[in-house]
Image (cartoon, rainbow, N blue to C red):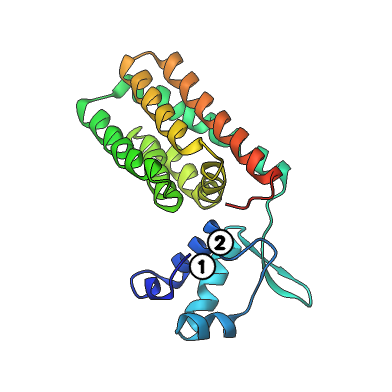
Amino acid sequence: MIHITEVKKNSVYDYLYNAIRTGDIKPGQTLTERELAEKIGVSRTPVREAIRKLEEQGLVTHVPHKGVKVATLTMEKVAQLYEVREVLEGLAARTLSQIQTPEIIDELNSYVAKAEKEAAANNIKELADINSEFHLALTRLSENFYLEAIMTMLQTQIGLMMSTSLSQAGRPLRNVEEHKMMISAIQSGDGDVAESMARFHVRKAKENAFKKIAEGGNG
């Protein structure tokens, strides 16, 4: 549950995005500026700006005569998102295997260490946050400007699906183990192995997201 007091520390956009990601605000739910402003305790202006940003990212949509509704990702779009993510993260892992340094490996391992604690406690929201940081680090550390830019652009949608995938029973701990395997593959210096492991990880995440969606889960 996202608490209203968190908005004092974060922007209205962050509050709404996290509420959508965690399912506090559900797909198809109508968002109204007045009600949200009253609930959060802010003026309508930051709410309007947040909704505009969410719309630009495809997370909400204007429905004629019905207002703004939270978008529902179709299975087709989810599949397309994972296909693109698989290619991009495979490239990032391959690149990292060729430019790896002790500092790069240490940073990736630091995310895994934090993720292990949250996975053991089944703290899905916190784990999803760390998971996003790990995957963004893969592209950032690759030092490929365009790769990082594309992944950053897609991150809002990817973040939603990460929460969905990680909500599948048993997935949190398996996710951490796959991250360890990815780091080992990168550290091996073998580009083919690193790319293959990264692609495998994304495919497993896709499988679990589809299972959760089929069960009626929304993250």
What residue is shown at x 42% (from left), y 20% (from top)?
A: 194
Residue 183 picture quarter: top left
Write the residue at 62% across / 79% down: 32
Image-based side of 108 in relation to 68, left or right: left
Rendering coords of residue 54 (x, y %): 56, 64
Residue shown at 46% from the left, 68% from the top: 15
**Residue 33 x %, y %:** 58, 81
Q: Is residue 115 above or below residue 190?
A: below
How many marks can you see?
A: 2
The residue furthest right is 65
Q: Quadrant of residue 147?
A: top left
**Looking at numbered disc 2 in the image, what kind of residue is underneath it?**
Ile
Please state the horizontal and vertical placement of residue 200, each as a whole percent of the image. Answer: 53, 24
Q: Which residue is mark 1?
A: 16
Q: Are marks 2 and 1 in contact (CB under 8 Å)?
A: yes
Tell me the tag on residue 199.
Answer: none
Q: Is residue 91 above or below residue 139?
A: above
**Residue at image point 49% right, 19% down:** 196
Under mark 1, the amino acid is Leu
Q: Secondary structure at mark 1?
A: helix
Q: CA distance from mark 2 to mark 1?
A: 6 Å
Q: Which residue is mark 2?
A: 20
Residue closest to the eye, 157 or 210: 210
Q: Which type of secondary structure does the marked residue at label 2 adopt?
A: helix
Q: Is residue 21 positioned above or below 16 on the image?
A: above
Judge from the rendering whether residue 155 lies leftward or rightward of residue 98; answer left or right.
Answer: right
Residue 191 screen position, x and y as percent: 41, 16
Q: Is residue 191 above or below residue 61?
A: above
Determine if residue 44 is in view: no
